[in-house]
Amino acid sequence: MSWPPSPPIVVPVDFSGEEVAAVQTALAVAAKPEDVHLLHVLYPLDAVSPGVVFAEVGDQERRDAVQVEFDKILAKHGLPKLQHQVRIGDPGHEVCEYAEAVGAGLIVVPSHGYGGFKRFLLGSVAERIIRNAGCDVLVTRRSDAE
């Protein structure tokens, strides 16, 4: 592992609040802010989802809403304008695929630290990223961890 990592650095964003520390960590190790790429992954809509059935919400509307949220979170926390992307699919898979596509040297993943039954039901995106990433992965600690 070389340090600092080669650019770019990918930070998955799920708007839980934990991603702010991950973005700040990525900015601290990046040579320049342009090296930090934010990525949000939307789960695919089911054919029976109300928004699909009534043709009120499609993938483009969802992507547009996420782009607005990216801008809000960056402004709220005084973070510089960063590259951000929205993909649709399985978050663990899409993050790894995006990192490989852009030649990332590091993925900085915010942890939610779910354990036990909750982890069994929800799975762990961070764990899937760690297992499947083609580059180094740094998992940041939860803000409420003891």
Image (cartoon, rainbow, N blue to C red):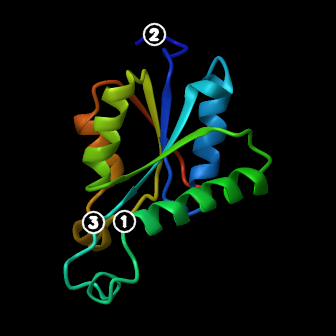
Q: Which residue is mark 1?
A: 59
What's the residue type where badge 2 is placed? Ser
For the view shown, which residue lies furthest in the top direction? Answer: 2
Q: Nearer the viewer, residue 117 or 130?
A: 130
Q: Position of residue 43 (x, y in %)?
A: 31, 64
Q: Nearer the viewer, residue 9 or 48?
A: 48
Alpha carbon of mark 1 to alpha carbon of mark 2: how far?
38 Å
What's the residue type where badge 3 is placed? Pro
Residue at x-position 48% and y-position 14%: 6
Disc 3 versus disc 1: nearer the observer: 1
Q: Is 132 left, or right, of 73 in this rendering?
A: left
Residue 22 vs 51, above or below: the answer is above
Circle 2 packing at 10 Å, graded few (<14), some (14-19), many (20+), is few
**Residue 2 - label:** 2
Q: Which of the 4 quarters of the picture holds residue 73? A: bottom right
What's the residue type where badge 1 is placed? Asp
Q: Which residue is mark 3?
A: 44
